[in-house]
């Protein structure tokens, strides 16, 4: 069945940091709550973890005019169109779904952790216990059953919405136009367009752990798009060359006894 | 064994060589299974791609040990070019590619073999070190890890290509060579053709070991 | 506020009133109400001041900071029910005291270290959360700092934490009609551990 390409919109200007999405995500995905410590922040767990696929990042920000703002940003998988993790995944555990999102087939994951260093947003997390990586799959199972992702479903302020790609991009720009100031749309301009869009309250550079201009790392392009085919080309070339050498030049045979010092063959 | 055959390699050399060779092949095969999703089925014979990962990782450790002995054993013989005859040999490509009236005489290893040895030693070490980082990528900064993947892939391109060169020249491309690494005994004719200078050296130093003849002196290999 | 829930400038039938008036809290930084001669609400019930938990330290140098209490989103009331819930406990694991960055700098308190908050009635130890969100007040020409603690912790679960209840600090006083507790403003001191 043809499914529409979906985009989740995170309007940070509406987020009240209640963290309902953070808990709902764990509930739907049956991820355990682990013991944490208070480290002097409302942000807890302090970072994304194998059991925490979405996290509200709290940040106290004073702009150059001295005005104070408490910034909240729901962090999690951006579901890139040009996804570095899908590119490097050796087993196909990470894949593009019919919704355009990046799905994770956990049973195929071999725990190689290549996606961890590949991701420009630093999203996948590894669990020593299961030797697998984990990340948000935008509730693929719920989407398949025409239900909203758990985080969107639980959001009480309307900061999280999901819908068709074009409509959501339009909605994001309309919201930014309405708000004005430094608000901006984040996500549609890089890595082929992400399937999670932000309406950011401040410029992207202001936010912690948010790359300003993310891209598929150049090393991965060299690795996967250049060296990978080159490996086959080189080996194939050598095999073909060896065959040609054998039939055209011939093998290097020892000289027959008595016919020494003639050289060449 | 036939009378008159000459010992080209001793048992230690052959064990080290095949430890390196077989682990290298196993690494190439398992590596291919992870590099190309269409070859994921290679993992099926090991009980899944995850087991294949472990086979690859631990074979890599074995490869590292074998590589250490390989380098220690052959460094002096195959790691250093002797000028100017090696340069001349390279200029005429050892007579492998076009007709050469007089190929410079080579010792135990010709410059082609030396280049192969250096490639294996260099890129093998790169494979081992980058592989270790890739095994524990979370302990290193992502920028370093990303570079390791590229180097690992580059090493594979080189080693995989060189592997087939080695396979061809070690078997049908140069008949008689395989024996040097299988039984260790080669014919005098092969030795005269392939490594004439070495033959002369062994004869001069009295280190030549001929099957069926009494040893003239102590064994030449010092390890 | 009247019985029907609506506010009114003239509100008869209450313990105080009938006109609106400003009173200082039972325990505050001021010894004198700048608005009138009556410092605190005269209609409230004050318990025996000789009891340890009913002592008051008004405008005292020993307890110079205004303290306020509140709930965090993740826990309900004292947290005795919600702290059993692993997801909520993970998000809000321990008691903390929010301290303005200026006061924290004065006291040499770094973010995330354990501190002692004490009132004349008792003391609690918890983690300091240094923040720009708490800004000092300027009251009668004096800079008065404020700190804040959530009231969602103490005694019960989890067993391996030493969190005390914020109730150990707060005064037992309520409004004159419903005894809605006055936990939003009282005086404490904060010290490094």
Image: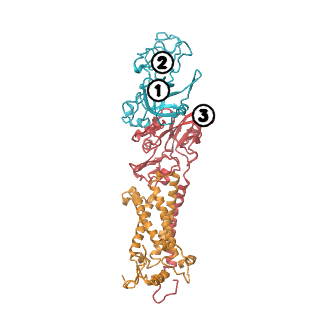
* Residue annotated with mark 1: C69
Residue A55 at x, y percent in the picture: 48, 40
Residue A199 at x, y percent in the picture: 56, 38
Examine the rendering and report whether any part of residue A222 can be seen: yes
Other residues around mark 2 within 10 Å, as few (<14) / some (14–19) / many (≥20):
many
Q: Looking at the picture, do discs 1 and 3 lie on one chain?
A: no
Q: Is residue A25 above or below residue B176?
A: above
Q: Is residue B45 above or below residue C185?
A: below
In this view, the mark in front (3 or 2): 2
Q: Residue at x 48, y 31 (%)?
A: C191
Viewer-proximal residue among A69 and C27: C27
Which dot marks residue A179?
3
Examine the rendering and report whether any part of residue A15 can be seen: no
**The chain in red:** A
Q: Residue at x 41, y 37 (%)?
A: C87
Q: Secondary structure at mark 2?
A: loop
């Amino acid at each position: 069945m043809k499914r529409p390409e979906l985009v989740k919109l995170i309007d940070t200007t509406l987020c009240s940091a209640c963290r309902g999405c953070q808990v709902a995500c764990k509930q739907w995905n049956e991820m355990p709550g682990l013991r944490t410590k208070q480290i002097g922040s409302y942000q807890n767990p302090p970072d994304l973890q194998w059991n925490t696929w979405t996290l509200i990042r709290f940040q106290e920000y004073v702009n150059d005019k001295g005005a104070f703002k408490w910034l909240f940003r729901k962090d999690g998988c951006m579901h890139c169109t040009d996804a570095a993790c899908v590119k490097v995944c050796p087993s196909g555990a990470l894949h593009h779904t019919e919704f355009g999102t990046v799905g994770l087939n956990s049973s195929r994951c071999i725990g190689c952790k290549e996606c961890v260093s590949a991701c420009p947003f630093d999203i996948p997390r590894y669990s020593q216990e299961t030797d697998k990586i984990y990340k948000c799959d935008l509730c693929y199972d719920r989407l398949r059953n025409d239900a909203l992702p758990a985080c969107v479903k639980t959001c009480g302020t309307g900061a999280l919405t999901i819908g068709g790609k074009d409509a959501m991009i339009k909605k994001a720009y309309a919201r930014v136009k309405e708000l004005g100031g430094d608000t901006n749309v984040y996500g549609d301009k890089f890595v082929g367009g992400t399937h999670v869009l932000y309406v950011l309250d401040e410029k992207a550079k202001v936010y912690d752990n948010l790359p300003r201009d993310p891209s598929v790392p150049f090393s991965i392009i060299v690795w996967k798009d250049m060296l990978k085919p080159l490996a086959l080309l080189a080996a194939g070339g050598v095999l073909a060359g060896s065959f040609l050498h054998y039939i055209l030049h011939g093998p290097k045979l020892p000289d027959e006894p008595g016919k020494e010092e003639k050289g060449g063959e | 064994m036939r009378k008159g055959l000459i010992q080209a390699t001793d048992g230690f050399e052959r064990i080290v060589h095949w430890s390196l060779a077989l682990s290298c092949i196993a690494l190439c095969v398992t590596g291919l299974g992870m590099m190309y999703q269409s070859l994921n089925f290679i993992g099926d014979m090991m009980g899944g791609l995850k087991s294949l990962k472990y086979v690859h990782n631990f074979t890599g450790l074995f490869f590292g040990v074998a590589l250490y002995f390989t380098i220690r054993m052959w460094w002096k013989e195959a790691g250093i070019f002797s000028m100017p005859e090696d340069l001349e040999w390279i200029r005429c490509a050892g007579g492998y590619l076009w007709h050469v009236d007089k190929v410079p005489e080579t010792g135990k290893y010709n410059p082609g073999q030396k280049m192969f040895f250096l490639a294996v030693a260099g890129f093998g070490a790169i494979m081992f070190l980058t592989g270790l980082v890739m095994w524990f990528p979370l302990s290193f900064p992502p920028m370093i890890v990303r570079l390791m993947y590229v180097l690992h892939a580059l090493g594979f391109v080189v080693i995989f290509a060189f592997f087939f060169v080695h396979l061809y020249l070690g078997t049908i491309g140069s008949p008689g060579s395989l024996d040097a690494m299988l039984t260790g005994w080669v014919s005098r004719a092969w030795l005269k053709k392939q490594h004439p200078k070495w033959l002369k050296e062994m004869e001069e130093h009295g280190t030549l070991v001929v099957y069926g003849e009494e040893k003239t002196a102590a064994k030449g290999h010092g390890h | 506020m009247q019985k029907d829930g609506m506010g009114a400038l003239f509100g008869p039938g209450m313990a105080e009133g009938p006109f609106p008036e400003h009173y200082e809290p039972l325990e505050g930084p001021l010894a004198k109400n700048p608005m009138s001669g009556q410092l605190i609400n005269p209609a409230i019930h004050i318990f025996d001041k000789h009891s340890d938990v009913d002592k008051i330290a008004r405008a005292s140098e020993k307890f110079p900071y205004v303290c306020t209490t509140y709930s965090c989103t993740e826990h309900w009331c004292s947290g005795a029910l919600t702290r059993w819930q692993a997801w909520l406990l993970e998000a809000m694991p321990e008691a903390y005291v929010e301290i303005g960055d200026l006061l924290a700098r004065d006291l040499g308190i770094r973010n995330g270290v354990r501190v002692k908050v004490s009132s004349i009635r008792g003391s609690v130890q918890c983690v300091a959360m240094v923040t720009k969100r708490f800004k000092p007040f300027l009251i009668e020409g004096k800079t008065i700092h404020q700190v804040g603690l959530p009231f969602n912790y103490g005694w019960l679960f989890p067993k391996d934490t030493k969190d005390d209840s914020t109730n150990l600090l707060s005064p037992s006083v309520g409004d004159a009609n419903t005894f809605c507790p006055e936990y939003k403003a009282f005086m404490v001191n904060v010290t490094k551990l």
